[in-house]
Image (cartoon, rainbow, N blue to C red):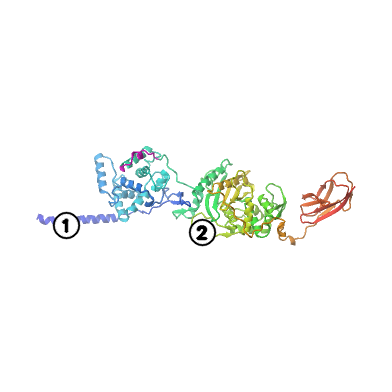
């Protein structure tokens, strides 16, 4: 009877075992596995791959993407040796470790060692579940077994490296390594690796900046497990958590808003130069009136790549400086910085040449009567001098002939987006338009590139179509003039820098934009809310910052281009007659101005020689007037018609007057 029962019992046992196994398998297979696709932070990197900024994931944590081949092998060895020696042998649960931990807990009445495998820890991390309750532990076991059926060991290890907490908002090995040691986890010392292994078990209780002794003790246990030398155990722990780098915050905000789906943005920005420009911007506003801020853009005009972009010296939403506003993209009045474009257009249209004479004298266009910044007028000057001195009357005269719409069209053709409140008028020549610092830098890059604009780009791989806005010769002529402007006092090595400053109406904006043979830099200072900054001038405030920015480039200013062969390089007298003096296009069709007249003294008058001045009264004629006595000029640049001549000698004298159009009149008198 017993013999018959034994085979039956064996069969029953095997059947029950198989049923139990099948039931267990179905139980494991039915496990609801949470999403294991890791949401990682969006990273902004510079042109060389260096980290510029990290955007946290939705819950505010910093979790950075990391592959196993980007981790120091020594760290992985220490992690497995300390946390899960049989990681590559078990299927999610280490029964020996569980039995040992359970036995130790029963004998001592407390938890002596953990029995969790790395897979069980991953199960806890992806579900964000607790560790103390048996129900929670059972759930971790079930989920760990399920994970092992769906993922390979490298996948599980990668999940651990992505989710392990390292204190504060730092999650994942890469964030922890950057926060505590300021470096990527590709090369770690033994002490660094050990601390990063110990921290995830109690990230807040073992934070080195708050609980240094607890951190040292936990690290020592890890080092003891791997038999590290004594000197390694004595190494200091970090005394503070580093803030992750946040360079070019305004630019990265803009790019993130444009594309928040891409996990990595490779920018054209150079982290080293960006750091220096941000430091320079902070220095530029130090000591300035409250609320004054600054913006700087550095680009390679040969490619259009932006190398540095500073929207504000600070990045804060409070205070008068409104640091959260990106002033590289704000519409502001450009002041005199548009003048070079007007002259380049005039050169291209055959209206003028750098050595053309142009009149700087009072002028009115209806109600609009522009004045020079200093209130003075200089009479006949060359176009070259007019641009060097940043006179206001000459560019307005040229704008009258070109038409404001043509300047607007040129800027738009160059990729800029100028904004007007109404119809474009002559005030456009002196900055009566809204334009951004980025657009101004882009247009000046066109001058530097022989008249061809390379649109600014901020991300690697972006393609932009070059656009010609000036001829080669016009661009070179303007650049050559700008390069001859005296640099600000104390500027070093300014030989190859062409630049122009500008100050908007009411001293609201101070500008300086310049270029060498490779780079173009724009600087703006002012208040974001548009209130005036009394006494602020582009030449005094922005120009020194511009030249200091050029000094921060890794190389000396690159030489400017040579003149193209078609450039007309002649003095005023050698120019073709129409280019010797600026005249409106329709001058020959206009009704000639009335010739000057000598009203007193009349022809043939005889005056008594008393040794005093001789009164002279004139009529008509175009200012300025020139008076000659016996063929010798005695008074020039006259803007009035009643004057006193110096005493005349006895005898006959011929008094002549010539106006600005070359018309003349004369009388002969006798002094006795």
Residue 632 is left or right of residue 191, and the answer is: right
Residue 180 vertical position relative to residue 394 in the rendered view, above or below: above
Q: State yes or no: residue 69 in magenta.
A: no
Q: CA distance from mark 1 to mark 2?
A: 74 Å
Circle number at residue 11: 1
Which mark lies nearer to you, 1 or 2? Answer: 2
Q: Residue furthest left?
A: 1
Badge 1 element:
helix
Which of these two is toward me, 611 or 651? 651
User: Measured from the top left, where is residue 125 in percent x and y?
Assistant: 35, 49
Circle number at residue 207: none
Tell me the quarter of the picture where residue 588 sits.
bottom right
Identify the residue position indicated by label 2 in the image: 463
User: Measured from the top left, where is residue 224 in percent x and y?
Assistant: 31, 41
User: Measured from the top left, where is residue 313 in percent x and y?
Assistant: 53, 45
Q: Residue furthest bottom?
A: 589
Q: Which residues are magenta?
A: 225-237
Residue 613 vertical position relative to residue 7 in the rendered view, above or below: above
Which of these two is toward me, 396 or 276? 276
Badge 2 element:
loop
Residue 126 is left or right of residue 585, and the answer is: left
Which of these two is toward me, 240 or 30? 240
**Magenta stretch: dominant secondary structure:** loop
The reply to whether residue 230 is in sight is yes
Quadrant of the snapshot with the N terminus: bottom left
User: Measured from the top left, where is residue 455 in percent x and y?
Assistant: 55, 57
The reply to whether residue 432 is in sight is no
- Classify 10 Å Cα crowding around label 1: few (below 14), some (14-19), many (20 and above): few
Cβ atoms at labels 1 and 2 below 8 Å apart: no
Q: Earlier in the sequence, mark 1 or mark 2?
A: 1
- Classify 10 Å Cα crowding around label 2: few (below 14), some (14-19), many (20 and above): few
């Amino acid at each position: 009877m017993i013999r018959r029962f034994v085979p039956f019992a064996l069969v029953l046992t095997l059947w029950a075992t198989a049923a139990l196994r099948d039931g267990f398998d179905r139980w494991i297979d039915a496990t609801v596995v949470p999403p294991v696709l890791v949401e990682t932070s969006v990273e902004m990197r510079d042109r060389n791959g260096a980290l510029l900024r990290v955007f946290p994931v939705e819950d505010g944590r910093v979790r950075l993407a990391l592959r196993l081949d980007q981790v120091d092998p020594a760290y992985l060895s220490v992690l497995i040796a300390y946390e899960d020696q049989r990681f590559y042998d078990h299927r999610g649960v280490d029964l020996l470790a569980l039995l040992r931990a359970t036995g130790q807990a029963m004998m001592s009445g407390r938890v002596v060692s953990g029995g969790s495998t790395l897979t069980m820890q991953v199960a806890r991390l992806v579900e964000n579940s607790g560790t103390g309750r048996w129900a929670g532990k059972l759930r971790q076991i079930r989920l760990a077994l399920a994970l092992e059926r769906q993922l390979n060991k490298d996948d599980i290890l990668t999940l651990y490296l992505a989710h392990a907490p390292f204190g504060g908002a730092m999650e994942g090995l890469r964030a922890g390594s950057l926060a505590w040691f300021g470096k990527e986890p590709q090369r770690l010392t033994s002490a660094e690796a050990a601390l990063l292994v110990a921290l995830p078990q109690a990230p807040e209780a073992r934070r080195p900046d708050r609980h240094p002794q607890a951190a040292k003790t936990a690290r020592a246990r890890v080092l003891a497990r791997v038999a590290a030398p004594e000197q390694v155990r004595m190494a200091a722990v970090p005394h503070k958590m580093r803030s992750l780098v946040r360079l070019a915050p305004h630019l990265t905000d803009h790019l993130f808003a444009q594309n928040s789906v891409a996990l990595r943005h490779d920018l054209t920005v150079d982290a080293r130069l960006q750091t220096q420009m941000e430091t320079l911007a902070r220095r530029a506003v130090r000591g300035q009136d409250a609320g004054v801020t600054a913006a700087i853009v550095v680009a390679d005009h040969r490619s259009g790549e932006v190398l540095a972009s500073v929207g504000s010296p600070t990045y804060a939403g409070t205070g008068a400086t409104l640091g959260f506003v990106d002033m590289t993209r704000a519409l502001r009045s450009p002041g005199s910085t548009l003048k070079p474009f007007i002259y380049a257009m005039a050169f291209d249209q055959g209206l003028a040449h750098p050595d053309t004479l142009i009149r700087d004298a009072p002028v009115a266009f209806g109600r609009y009567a522009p004045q020079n910044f200093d209130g003075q007028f200089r009479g006949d000057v060359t176009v070259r001098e007019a641009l060097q001195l940043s006179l206001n009357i000459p560019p307005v005269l040229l704008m009258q002939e070109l038409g404001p719409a043509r300047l607007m069209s040129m800027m738009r053709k160059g990729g800029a987006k100028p904004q007007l409140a109404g119809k474009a008028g002559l005030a456009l020549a002196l900055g009566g338009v809204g334009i951004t610092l980025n657009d101004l830098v882009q247009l000046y890059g066109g001058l530097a590139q022989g008249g061809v604009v390379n649109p600014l780009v901020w991300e690697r791989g972006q393609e932009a179509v070059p656009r010609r806005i000036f001829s080669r010769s016009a661009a070179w002529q303007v650049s050559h003039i700008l390069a001859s402007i005296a640099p600000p006092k104390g500027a070093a090595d300014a030989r190859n820098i062409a630049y122009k400053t500008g100050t908007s109406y009411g001293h609201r904006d101070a500008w300086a934009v310049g270029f060498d043979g490779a780079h173009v830099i724009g600087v703006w200072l002012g208040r974001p809310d548009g209130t005036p900054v009394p006494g602020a001038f582009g030449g005094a405030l922005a120009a020194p910052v511009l030249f200091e920015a050029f000094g921060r480039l890794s190389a000396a200013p690159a030489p400017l281009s040579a003149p193209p062969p078609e450039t007309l390089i002649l003095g005023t007298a050698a120019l073709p007659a129409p280019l010797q003096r600026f005249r409106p296009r329709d001058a020959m069709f206009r009704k000639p101005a009335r010739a000057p007249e000598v009203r007193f003294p009349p022809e043939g008058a005889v005056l008594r020689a008393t040794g005093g001045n001789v009164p002279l009264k004139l009529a008509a004629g175009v200012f300025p007037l020139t008076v000659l006595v016996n063929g010798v000029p005695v008074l020039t640049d006259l803007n009035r018609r009643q004057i006193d001549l110096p005493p005349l000698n006895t005898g006959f004298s011929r008094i002549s007057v010539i106006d600005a159009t070359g018309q003349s009149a004369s009388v002969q008198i006798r002094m006795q």
